[in-house]
Image (cartoon, grey):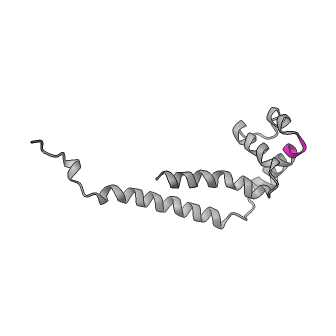
Amino acid sequence: MQIPEKSDLRNPTEKLIPILFTSAGVLSLLIIRIALFDFDWGDYSMFLQPWVESYRKMTFIEGLGTKVGNYNHPYMYILNIIARINFPDLYLIKTVPFSSIFCLLISL
């Protein structure tokens, strides 16, 4: 007969507490993002909106070959896709990090 390891004898709620605290933190971050969803930070009006407008004037293929701003390429590809969607740019741009926080919450 094998003696159980000390880690096997721990209270099962000890494993649950870090998950609950992490979930509460991520959920509060999600709530803050939702509360500030309409707020226009300076980077949107100064940089992102003109870049999306530049992509909107091009075809999708032209936009893939043209770097309009100074952000990394994957983000510029996302802006190129956002330029094709008939919805307010501010909401679509803010949906990108919002969706990653939501995926993090789901993965917990």
Where is residue 57, by image quadrant?
top right
Say how many tags the image has.
0
Residue 55 horizontal/vertical position (percent): 84, 43
15 sits to left or right of 71: left
Mostly what secondary structure, the magenta segment? Answer: helix
As drawn, which residue projects farthest toward the right? 57
The answer to if 25 sits in the magenta stretch is no
Q: Which residue is drawn at 64% across and 64% down?
A: 34
As drawn, which residue projects farthest toward the bottom? 35
2 sits to left or right of 87: left
Q: Residue at x 28, y 57 (%)?
A: 12
53 vs 39, nearest the viewer: 53
Q: Residue at x 62, y 53 (%)?
A: 99
97 sits to left or right of 81: left
70 sits to left or right of 13: right
Residue 95 against residue 68 in the figure, above or below:
below
Magenta extent: 54-58
As drawn, which residue projects farthest toward the front? 1
As drawn, which residue projects farthest toward the left? 1
Q: Residue at x 82, y 52 (%)?
A: 49
Quarter of the image with the N terminus is top left
Residue 56 horizontal/vertical position (percent): 86, 46
Residue 38 horizontal/vertical position (percent): 73, 65
Residue 60 against residue 89 in the figure, above or below:
above
Where is residue 39, by image quadrant?
bottom right
